Image (cartoon, rainbow, N blue to C red):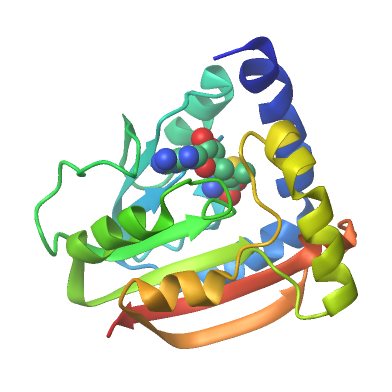
Amino acid sequence: MGIYSKFIFPRLMEKALGSEAAGGLRAEVLAVAVGETLEIGFGTGLNLRYYPRSISRLTAIDPEEMLPQLVERRITQAPFPVRRLKLDAQGRLPFDDESFNTVTTTFTLCSIPDTARTLSEMRRVLKSDGELVFLEHGRSDVSGVARWQDRLNPLQRMLGAGCNLNRRIDQIIASAGFEPVDLQRRLLPHAPRIIADLYLGRARKS
Ligand SMILES: C[S@@+](CC[C@H](N)C(=O)[O-])C[C@H]1O[C@@H](n2cnc3c(N)ncnc32)[C@H](O)[C@@H]1O
């Protein structure tokens, strides 16, 4: 892990994704999380303060360990147990089939190279009546914006640690065998237009 991805990117991420507007959306989507919950792409733990009391334990995975002291403090302050594991979600996850009530992903499906493999594992470990909860940015429906997303994607991938601007998150989720229970498209307030297009909601196994 280089200096940029270890020290600079996590701070940029905290600033961009730790806004009040993003916090409001996190609270909104995570409100339905319940029971044993798995978070994919934990980052710096920005979601921790938005989980409801209805979760019994959070298992949080990420291959990177960014800003470890800050993350440790956030974990200590959480009102539920947190198990943090350094894992790549593209591999076989060390969890039994159907072992989680909720699987969450926020601002992460943009960065994972093999989303099909990752979502297939998320589906495997999710209980049959469980829910996938997501808050992601992705491809705009406005053609002029989408064109700029395509143009700037190579640069974004470099500066954003592999983040893609132009993924159709709804299609990626549906093609992995999930059916949306609620799927909303919104704009993230005060964000540059190319990263403002959001896909948020929840889905069940189809
Ligand atoms: C933009 S950050 C978002 C962090 C956090 N989810 C949030 O909402 O603030 C993307 C996160 O995805 C993680 N990530 C990237 N590839 C991953 C993978 N293969 N498996 C799990 N997490 C991954 C990154 O390390 C990073 O923490």
User: Percent position (x, y) of residue 10?
Assistant: 66, 29
Quadrant of the rendering where the C terminus is positioned: bottom left
Measuring 21% from the left and 44% from the top, which residue is drawn there? 93
Measuring 25% from the left and 56% from the top, which residue is drawn there? 121
Judge from the rendering whether residue 46 lies leftward or rightward of residue 176; answer left or right.
right
Q: Quadrant of residue 85?
A: top left
Q: Quadrant of residue 22?
A: bottom right
Residue that extends furthest to the left in the rendered view of this protein: 96
User: Can residue 144 be seen in the rendering of this structure?
Assistant: yes
User: Percent position (x, y) of residue 43?
Assistant: 53, 37
Q: Quadrant of residue 44?
A: top right
Measuring 68% from the left and 57% from the top, which residue is drawn there? 23
**Total number of numbered discs in the rendering:** 0
Quadrant of the rendering where the N terminus is positioned: top right
Measuring 50% from the left and 67% from the top, which residue is drawn there? 134
Residue that extends furthest to the top in the rendered view of this protein: 3
* Up-down relation of residue 5 to residue 89 (above or below): above
Judge from the rendering whether residue 36 lies leftward or rightward of residue 63; answer left or right.
left
